[in-house]
Image (cartoon, grey):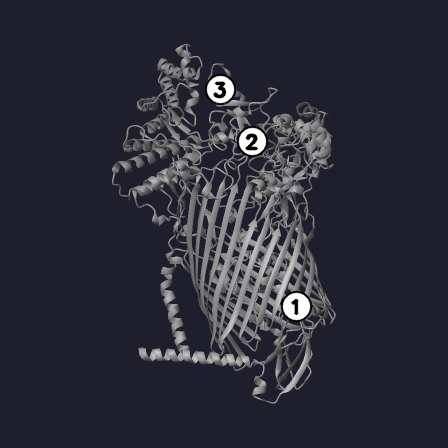
């Protein structure tokens, strides 16, 4: 009897031992592992969508923009950033890891797509076109912020990461230009498929922007201005127009309008916290305002008045009483006795559901940007009259007097 | 072949049935076999009493080695016929067994001793038990009485201060909440999360919700020598809990009832609402931090603002405004004199003079802390039944507890059921089975940060109720809200259903050889539902629900062998296998915009707002293990064990891990040469072992692609975790050297241990270069060392027939040091940390974070050395880089005013920056322990329990936030009216000025400081590196003072009961500490205002039938 038990026990153990490895091979059900992704075109499309989401997160900040300029003053609540206080140091400055995270994803997609079979080559080309254009856009942002940056073009595979040295800024721009050229060669459509995504006209707008930067900041000179102008010429043929009402451009119920070239998608419940929530007030802090109902406040504490517009910015709008942009851009919270509690942004009023949600699209390029860029390029090319002509298109719409001074001063005016 | 097999089987069953019948017959003649088979016998009579003199009825008396036995009657007397050379074994629940040789005597009176943490005990060593005398590893044991008397709904809390080396961190006063348990310093650099593995009756499951009444013993295996047998999951120690089982003897029914009152142990030192208004208006008028703050005086937006008459919310008007403050003139003008006199005469409003305008104001002091905190009442019922004979045993208990918390709206309700049975199917086969079920229904604070940290400090001039009787909002729609509003509009339902089913067999194949297969199922089901009714500040009707199911199957097969060779050599061997399968499923959903408040569930949500998600995960472990314990004459002890674990969490090549252990011991007192009379026992022990840790997710080894990165409503996926398929088990090796000693004939016992524990191949997130696109990757890297000593002392200070006084004390000291870190080019390969100026060194040096050879958890802070008395003094202040951005671009002379803090410029460079921080102390205590006194006198028992922790500092975050008005709407403390705070030019103060606008937002950060370094300031959130608010946390806690009285058995008997026990006690009575916050029981360097641990008073009665 005892023997049988021992035998059976032993054989049970043996069975366990041999069956174990298989038993322990548990496939994850609710998560995707590295080995189970990248099988079909749909994976590439889903990954590209993820990249847009990452780019939207990365772009939705004032840290690298107006924070460091003179447009803001401390708001009622603050606290303002060290970037605003111009006291950035190696210790407190933001890291570029977020940018490289986005770069990793684009690198990963471009790396993996080679091994995926597409039944429709145009689908592959569109994904590649958008990916290369986005990679150019991200590196362009980084080059503007840091100048020399490491050029990472392959996805990280494991913990053994080789450190990449910072590339010279000119090399970075060579790469960006190459990426844009590659992207342009891949776009299957000439026009817009969806203005919330990279398109051929948007890639040309990016090219114009990049060329003007290298032309002006890096001293690239005339050849860059020419390149910018020819890119702009193509953008202009994509069916754009200036909206007659300045406020309509930004409105949450007039997205992807005729003035938009490329904007990042925001909508209630997908992504509804545009950075404007740092420039608007939480309702309870302005309950003393007589015009409370007109203010773009939130009931819950999603808005926080970290910044208000600086006197410099206000004065710029105050130059002409007819300037329609001031009331579209900002609004004072005024007490019954006329005292101003604070000034809030007013351009991105979002949408009111149960509360206000800042779900205006984040505009990357719009037609007016391109017109002003064109004016700048023309002025740099000494085509001053043509430049003033472009400038006045924008001035006219803003409700401010057109420039009628001498072309001699005109060049300076356009550039400023 | 087949035929014979069939025959065999039939005959087996026939045989079985016959035997069963026989054993039933045997059972009937249980008491008389001796008479039937007529040997020479004598009749022994006597009485059984406990050492205090109380008679003990129902004591089981058996002739050793036979089934011949009886039980003592209601007077404790017994009579039985035995052979003159018999040995009688007296046993009774809760008492130590006593063996007495008859030696021909006919009268034997016996005293039974209450069992306590004595030397002669049996301890669990994992898949078996061992006599304490032979144990060579480090095990602490807590008995049922100790757990019951500690008055903890969650049994793990009863361990606090009771076992050396076991750090029980109770930081949450919510009824039923679980403490964090750290054994011997844990194994990681964040020990708070290094919880031990809990094993309840052999089943791995969480300990919370277990009924303390059901617990027989609770033991902690501390060194790797004892935990190695649990291999991969043993590294953080093992807590083994054994629930009660039926004891042999007459059936007993026990009924217990207790009621408890709990209150907040220490209140916040709030000022009155009048002082709040006075201080805030005075500070706002000064407008020192925010030029706009003067406007706050009259914009109705802050709890110190007037102009509430122009409120347009909730129907408009003063009585519907959020705040209760107004100028009387204005209120009379706006709403008439009738309202004002009604408010003053009937509604408890008060008046005061505005320090700014000199005008008379009216306000209401709501004493919000009395609204928020309540006296919690609890009721606890327990009934259990226990019985047993040589054939079967049963224990079953039903418990119901209903406990209110001290924070309004919080409660914990539990229903528990336990049944443990054994049955001897045959002489050598015992079946055991058990079911353990708990249902818990509880309500936490809606959000610990929102409801407690923030809402508890809502200014007291905030309105509580609107005239229509509904609660007012408090600050606003987010947090902090008036807790009354939160409770009125929010519905939470949180329930846990936990059940364990287990069955096992103990088959003694031959003498000493047992085969013990067992199986268990643990089900953990949790249900959550949340709904917020419509109100003007949140019109969404947000709702969410989740349902989760965790299911763990365990199968064990164990073979044990006990054998003694040549009388002197004893072997106890065990070998087995275990298979554990854990499956987890969660379904959760959310919705909003339901058309009605009547339905709080998702079916009412608007369809387009419904979001649903579910997750399934599996985790498997296969193990083989074995152990051999050998002793020679119980003098020389040796144990060897090993375990092989395979885990599904690792990749193909690294699935298996091996964890060995070896222990040795020497009972020195058994040696012939031992002649030290005062030391009657001395055992020296040494052990070494390894155990592991597999805390990682499958995505760490195989990478993860996650959904949720949607864009334009198209689902997007991104690679969120980089795979590392070279991950291996984390291994903790520990060496333990210890001794067990008894002095003066067991009057004094002392256990001591020294351990050295190294955890290597730590599963940690190591930083990657930023350009890689990932911040970290999970890797095996580096090692940490915990080294310490611990002592457990037991003293029977008084031991007479009438009076006993037992003292149990323990002490432990642990030091956690980082040994190895990934090479990163830094000195000591430091991760995080920062540069500070060391005055002694006369140079800068790196401190904090993690560094090789250093302790971790140090706290550095800006050293506040005073307060500028005047603006002129302040103009001399060095440039401060730590003020808010608003003041950063002001030059040195214009940054500070009178009343701002003076910071020590440690490096003397005329700039205050992060390098000027100084060392304050450590975040976690390194010396802990406790003292338990038990005095018994006749039927009275008295307990006085203390515990202590030494060596930590605490940043009083909530005090800094209150004085810094860090949310613009924070109740003031009495600090604002003390002479210590700066108010006027020339004031010699120790607390910087109070600000009406947040000190953090646009202020000087006199109170709420920050550092850009990580791992240098206090680790806790909402706590700040400001020396003003950091003080020593050393404490001695008066944990328990309790009495119990056992009514004399004669009286009990008249009431048809065998025992009546009355108890009364006070718990968490207070602290001896220098720390000025609510509780010094903080382990992460800060107190932000959590759920305070309540003071409790309990009264109970226990009836045994």
Q: Name the mark nearer the viewer: 3 or 2.
A: 3
Comparing B545 with B1075, the one in front is B545
- What is the x, y in percent for residue A118? 26, 41
In which quarter of the view is residue A334 placed?
top right
Report helix, strand or loop for mark 1.
strand
List the residue tagged with mark 2.
A78
Mark 3 vs mark 2: which is more N-terminal? 2
List the residue tagged with mark 1.
B749
> Looking at the rendered structure, which numbered label has been put on residue B870?
none
List the residue tagged with mark 3.
A326
Q: Which chain does tag 1 point to?
A: B
- What is the x, y in percent for residue B813? 62, 57
Report the label total.
3
Let me know if marks 3 and 1 both belong to one chain: no
**Mark 1 residue crowding within 10 angstroms, few (<14) / some (14–19) / many (20+):** many
Disc 3 to disc 1: CB gap under 8 Å: no
Q: Is residue A166 visible?
A: no
In which quarter of the view is residue B331 placed?
top right
Marks 1/2: CA–CA distance: 62 Å
- What is the x, y in percent for residue A115? 28, 44
Q: Quadrant of the C terminus of chain B?
A: bottom right
In which quarter of the view is residue B938 placed?
bottom right
């Amino acid at each position: 009897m005892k023997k049988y038990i021992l035998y059976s026990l032993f054989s049970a153990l043996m069975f366990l031992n041999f069956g174990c490895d298989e038993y322990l091979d548990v496939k994850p059900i609710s998560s995707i592992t590295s080995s189970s992704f990248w099988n079909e075109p749909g994976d590439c499309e889903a990954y590209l969508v993820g990249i847009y989401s990452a780019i939207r997160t990365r772009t939705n900040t004032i840290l690298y923009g107006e924070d460091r300029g003179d447009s803001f003053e401390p708001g009622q609540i603050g606290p303002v950033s060290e970037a605003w206080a111009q006291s950035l140091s190696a210790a407190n400055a933001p890291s570029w890891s977020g940018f490289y995270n986005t770069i990793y994803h684009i690198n990963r997609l471009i790396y993996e797509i080679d091994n995926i079979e597409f039944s429709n080559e145009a689908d592959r080309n569109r994904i590649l076109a958008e990916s290369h254009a986005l990679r150019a856009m991200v590196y362009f942002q980084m080059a503007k912020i840091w100048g020399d940056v490491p050029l990472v073009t392959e996805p990280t595979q494991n913990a053994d990461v080789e450190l990449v040295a910072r590339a010279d800024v000119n090399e970075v721009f060579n790469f960006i230009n190459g990426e844009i050229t590659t992207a342009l060669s891949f776009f299957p459509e000439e026009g817009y498929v969806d203005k919330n995504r990279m398109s051929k006209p948007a890639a040309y707008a990016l090219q114009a922007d990049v060329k003007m930067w290298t032309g002006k900041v890096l001293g690239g000179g005339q050849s860059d201005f020419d390149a910018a102008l020819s890119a702009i010429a193509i953008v202009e043929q994509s069916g754009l127009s200036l909206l007659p009402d300045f406020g309509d451009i930004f409105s949450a119920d007039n997205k992807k309008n005729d003035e938009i070239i490329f904007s990042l998608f925001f909508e209630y419940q997908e992504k509804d916290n545009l950075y404007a929530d740092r420039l608007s007030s939480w309702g309870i802090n302005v309950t003393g305002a007589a015009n409370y109902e007109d203010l773009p406040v939130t009931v819950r504490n999603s808005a926080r008045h970290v910044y208000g517009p600086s006197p410099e910015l206000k004065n710029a709008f105050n130059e002409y009483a007819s300037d329609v942009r001031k009331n579209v851009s900002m609004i004072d919270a005024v007490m019954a006795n006329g005292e101003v509690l604070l000034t809030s942004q007013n351009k991105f009023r979002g949408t009111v559901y149960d509360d206000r949600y800042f779900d205006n699209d984040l505009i990357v390029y719009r037609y007016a940007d391109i017109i002003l860029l064109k004016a700048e390029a023309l002025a740099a090319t000494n085509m001053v009259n043509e430049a003033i002509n472009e400038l006045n298109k924008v001035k006219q719409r803003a409700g401010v007097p057109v420039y009628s001074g001498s072309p001699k001063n005109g060049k300076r005016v356009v550039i400023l | 072949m087949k035929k014979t097999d069939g025959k065999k089987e039939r005959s087996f069953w026939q045989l079985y049935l016959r035997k069963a019948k026989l054993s039933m017959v045997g059972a009937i003649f249980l008491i008389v076999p001796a008479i039937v088979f007529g040997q020479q016998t004598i009749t022994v009579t006597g009485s059984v009493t406990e050492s205090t003199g109380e008679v003990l009825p129902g004591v089981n008396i058996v002739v050793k080695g036979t089934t011949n036995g009886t039980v003592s009657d209601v007077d404790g007397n017994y009579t039985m016929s035995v052979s003159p050379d018999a040995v009688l074994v007296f046993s009774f629940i809760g008492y130590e067994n006593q063996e007495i040789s008859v030696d021909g005597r006919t009268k034997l009176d016996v005293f039974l001793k209450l069992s306590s943490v004595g030397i002669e005990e049996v301890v669990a060593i994992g898949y078996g038990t061992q006599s304490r005398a032979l144990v060579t590893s480090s095990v602490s044991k807590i008995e049922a009485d100790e757990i019951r008397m500690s008055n903890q709904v969650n049994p793990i809390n009863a361990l606090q201060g009771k076992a050396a080396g076991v750090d029980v961190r109770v930081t949450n006063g919510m009824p039923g909440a679980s403490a964090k348990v750290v054994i011997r310093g844990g194994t990681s650099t964040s020990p708070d999360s290094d919880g031990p593995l809990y094993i309840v009756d052999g089943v791995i499951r969480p300990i919370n919700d277990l009924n303390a009444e059901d617990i027989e013993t609770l033991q902690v295996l501390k060194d790797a020598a004892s935990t190695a047998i649990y291999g991969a999951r043993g590294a953080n120690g093992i807590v083994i809990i054994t629930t009660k089982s039926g004891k042999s003897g007459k059936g007993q029914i026990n009924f217990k009832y207790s009621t408890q009152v709990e209150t907040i142990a220490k209140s916040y030192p709030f000022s009155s609402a009048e002082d709040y208004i006075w201080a805030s208006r005075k500070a706002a008028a000064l407008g020192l931090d925010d030029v706009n703050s003067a406007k706050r005086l009259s914009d109705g937006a802050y709890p110190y603002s007037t102009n509430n008459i122009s409120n347009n919310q909730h129907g408009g008007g003063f009585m519907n405004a959020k705040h209760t403050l107004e100028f009387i003139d204005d209120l009379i003008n706006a709403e008439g004199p009738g309202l004002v006199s009604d408010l003053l005469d009937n509604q408890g409003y008060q008046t005061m003079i505005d320090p700014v305008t000199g005008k008379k104001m009216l306000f209401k002091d709501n004493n919000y802390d009395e609204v928020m905190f309540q006296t919690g009442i609890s009721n606890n019922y327990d009934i259990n039944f226990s019985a047993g004979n040589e054939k079967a045993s049963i224990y079953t208990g039903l418990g119901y507890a209903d406990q209110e918390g001290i924070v309004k709206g919080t409660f914990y309700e539990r229903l528990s059921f336990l049944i443990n049975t054994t049955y001897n199917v045959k002489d050598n086969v015992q079946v055991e089975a058990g079911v353990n079920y708990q249902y818990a229904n509880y309500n936490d604070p809606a959000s610990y940060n929102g409801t407690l940290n923030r809402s508890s400090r809502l200014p007291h001039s905030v309105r509580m109720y609107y005239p229509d009787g509904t609660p007012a909002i408090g600050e606003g729609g987010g947090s902090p809200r008036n807790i009354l509003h939160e409770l009125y509009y929010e519905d939470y339902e949180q329930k846990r259903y936990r059940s364990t089913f287990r069955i096992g067999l103990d088959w003694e194949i031959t003498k000493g050889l047992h085969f013990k297969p067992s199986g268990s199922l643990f089900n953990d089901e949790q249900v959550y539902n949340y709904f917020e009714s419509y109100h003007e500040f949140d019109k969404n009707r947000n709702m969410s629900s989740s349902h989760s199911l965790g299911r763990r199957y365990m199968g064990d097969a164990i073979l044990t062998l006990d054998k003694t060779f040549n009388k002197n050599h004893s072997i106890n061997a065990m070998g087995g296998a275990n298979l554990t399968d854990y499956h987890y499923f969660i379904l959760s959903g959310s919705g909003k915009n339901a058309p009605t408040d009547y339905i709080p569930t998702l079916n009412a949500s608007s369809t387009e707002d419904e979001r649903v998600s579910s997750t399934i995960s599996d985790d498997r472990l296969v193990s083989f293990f074995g152990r051999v314990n050998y002793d020679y004459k119980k003098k020389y002890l040796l144990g060897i064990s090993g375990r092989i674990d395979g885990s599904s969490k690792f990749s193909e090549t690294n699935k298996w891990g091996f964890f060995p252990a070896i222990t040795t011991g020497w009972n020195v007192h058994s040696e012939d040469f031992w002649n030290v009379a005062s030391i009657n026992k001395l055992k020296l022990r040494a052990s070494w072992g390894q155990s592991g840790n597999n805390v990682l997710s499958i995505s760490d080894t195989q990478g993860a692609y996650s959904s949720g990165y949607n864009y334009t409503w198209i689902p997007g996926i991104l690679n969120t975790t980089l795979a590392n398929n070279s991950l291996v088990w984390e291994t903790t090796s520990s060496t333990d050297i210890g001794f067990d000693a008894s002095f003066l004939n067991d009057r004094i016992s002392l256990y001591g241990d020294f351990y050295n524990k190294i955890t290597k191949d730590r599963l940690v997130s190591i930083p990657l270069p930023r350009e890689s696109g990932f911040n970290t990757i999970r890797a095996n890297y580096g090692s940490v060392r915990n080294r310490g000593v611990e002592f457990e002392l037991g003293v029977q200070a008084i031991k007479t027939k009438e009076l006993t006084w037992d003292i149990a004390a323990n002490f432990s000291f642990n030091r956690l040091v980082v040994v190895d870190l990934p090479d990163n080019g830094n000195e000591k390969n430091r991760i995080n940390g920062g540069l500070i100026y060391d005055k002694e060194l006369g140079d800068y040096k790196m401190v904090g974070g993690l560094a090789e050879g250093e302790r971790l958890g140090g706290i550095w802070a800006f050293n506040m050395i005073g307060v500028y008395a005047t603006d002129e003094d302040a103009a001399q202040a060095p440039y401060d880089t730590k003020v808010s951005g608003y003041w950063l671009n002001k030059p040195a002379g214009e940054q500070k005013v009178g009343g701002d803090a003076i910071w020590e410029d440690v490096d003397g460079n005329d700039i205050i920056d992060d390098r000027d921080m100084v060392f304050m102390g450590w975040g976690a205590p390194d010396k802990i322990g406790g003292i338990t006194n038990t005095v018994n006198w006749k039927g009275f028992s008295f307990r006085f329990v203390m515990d202590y922790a030494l060596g930590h500092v605490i940043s009083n975050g909530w005090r800094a936030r209150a004085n810094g008005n860090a949310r613009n709407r924070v109740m003031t403390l009495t600090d604002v009216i003390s002479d210590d705070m700066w108010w006027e030019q020339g004031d010699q103060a120790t607390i910087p000025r109070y600000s009406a606008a947040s000190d953090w937002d646009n202020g000087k950060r006199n109170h709420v400081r920050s550092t850009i370094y990580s791992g240098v300031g206090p680790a806790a959130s909402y706590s700040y590196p400001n020396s003003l608010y950091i003080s020593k946390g050393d404490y001695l806690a008066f944990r328990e003072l309790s009495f119990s009285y056992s009514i004399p058995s004669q009286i009990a008997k008249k009431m048809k009961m065998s025992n009546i026990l009355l108890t009364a006690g006070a718990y968490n009575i207070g602290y001896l500490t220098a720390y000025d916050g609510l509780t010094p029981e903080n382990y992460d360097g800060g107190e932000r205002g959590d759920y305070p641990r309540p003071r409790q008073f309990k009264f109970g009665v226990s009836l045994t039938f």
